[in-house]
Amino acid sequence: MNTQKKLRVWLLVVLIFFPEIARAITIQEEEELSREFMVAVNEHYEIIRDSIITDYVTRIGEKILAVMPPQPFSYHFHVIKEYTYNAFAGPGGQVFINSGLFEALSSEEEIAGILAHEISHVACRHVSEQIERSKKIGLATLAGVAAGILMGATGAGSAAGATAVGSMAAAQTATLAYSRENETQADQRGLDYLTKAGYSPKGLLTALTKIRSRQWYGKEQIPTYLMTHPAVEDRMTFIGAWIESNPSIIRQLPSHSPAPFDWAHARLLAMFGPEDDALKYFKTQVTQTPDKALAHYGYGLILTRTGNRGAAMDQFRTALTKRAFDPTILTELGRTYFLDGRYAEALGTLQGSLDISPDATEGLFYTGRCLIELGKFQEATRFLESLLRSTPDYPDALFYLGSAYGSLGKTSDACYYLGSYYYTRGDYKNAVVQLEKAMESTTDPEKKSEIEILLKDAKKRHTLKVRESETRKR
């Protein structure tokens, strides 16, 4: 995405994220804003929708939420495919961590520390305060602030990054000083939540140390986190002093098995990290630690990603000799068979993994796809519908479920799911086409009402996109 387009995107998000509000927003308004915010994020950024990675991050977030007072929001945790170091909170309980920052971390306690801080921003209503406060500063400044608050897709050395930093500096009295207060409060709350959830604050301290060390690589590589989370030195001093002042609390905290982090981290690096780095890393791991299933699993993932499926299958089979009947490894072997066009073998392997882990998202998805390829469309719909009941925001499952229903001649269901797929992808033109067909063919009053609501919103968003496109052409 070029600089001009990024700035247009940021301006669009500003209009959504910072509407003209003459008073502090209510919980209900923030929830509505959250939905609008996620539409903008999904349109312009890649959210990693891998169930193993996102479920792992969500489990950590939920452990922290479990020790907090009742919250007005239903929290959601996301990993953004961006190599910059950043984590941030959006309106209505939306919490994000960039893949680059996740990859740089080395323990569950470090991730927990980052998430506790972002959750605290939401719980303290800092995001809603920023929205309310934003009406006092201009749109150009808001564009810069939004650039920092969101993904941090460029470094400070780029033109867009310079715009963001310059705008934020210009708004220091209106925004940055206030943010320092927010940071202090978020750290105070976050430390309390962390320890109650059984995590040591040392993880947050080491995570901040890694983020800060990145700035010494050069101006163009300053982590976005340092621009959106000011006073990192003061924060580290405060956290260090807290740890020294509370030795009894630290001693009582449980230790955490490194295995869940190691497997999620390896998957993130192999499937979403830079390909050359991942190949080199896992090839070295297999050589140095040939008895570890994780090394062969990670190497298999990156080999599948780069198209070397035969070698990948060998790695997964080797991993299974170290960790027999592991459903995660079985699923990846089945997925690789599928990608290689060996659908019968894929189906047998995937069904074996589902016998052990019946609700596994990837297992359900690729089983459904195998059944479609084998012409067993009715069976495929059962697996894909089961997936969507537990993971409703899985776009590709919507697409293939719609395709399966189309093959069965069920036009209403096919168009509904395809329309829902295009809607989640931000392709509102095709969403409208499919949803209108679904509306014409459905006889279910409840489904008709649901389609009507979705169709109305899709038409509105399509109109806005057309107007935006026409404005750009002028």
Image (tube, rainbow, N blue to C red):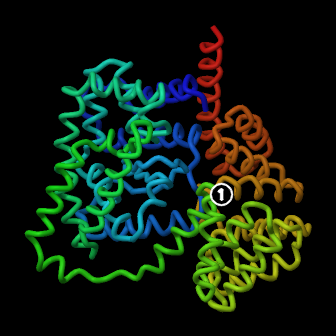
Q: Nearer the viewer, residue 124 or 269?
A: 269
Q: Which residue is the extreme one toward the right?
A: 375
Q: Which residue is the extreme one toward the left?
A: 245
| Residue 378 % position (x, y) | 83, 68
> Of the residues shown, which amino acid type is indicated by label 1?
Asp
Q: Nearer the viewer, residue 382 or 280?
A: 280
Give the left or right position of residue 204, taking residue 59 as reference.
left
Give the left or right position of residue 148, taking residue 272 as reference.
left
| Residue 301 % position (x, y) | 68, 69
Is residue 151 at least partly visible in the picture? yes
Tell me where residue 396 sits by quadrant.
Answer: bottom right
Query: Quarter of the image containing the N terminus?
Result: top right
Relative to 77, does residue 226 appear above or below in the rendering? above
Query: Quarter of the image containing the C terminus?
Result: top right
Relative to 98, does residue 259 appear above or below in the rendering? below
Q: What secondary structure is found at the residue carrying circle 1?
A: helix
Relative to 160, does residue 412 appear above or below in the rendering? below
Crowding at label 1, few (<14), some or many (≥20) Cα neighbours within 10 Å?
few
Q: Residue at x 21, y 26 (%)?
A: 174
Q: Nearer the viewer, residue 65 or 185?
A: 185
Q: Residue at x 83, y 73 (%)?
A: 310
Tell me where residue 44 sits by quadrant.
Answer: top right
Q: Which residue is the extreme one toward the top?
A: 474
Is residue 31 at least partly visible in the picture? no
Q: Residue at x 74, y 84 (%)?
A: 317
Q: Nearer the viewer, residue 139 or 304?
A: 304
Give the left or right position of residue 262, taking residue 31 as reference.
right
Q: Residue at x 44, y 65 (%)?
A: 58
| Residue 164 % position (x, y) | 39, 28
Relative to 37, does residue 398 appear above or below in the rendering? below
| Residue 190 % position (x, y) | 23, 60
Q: Which residue is mark 1?
A: 276
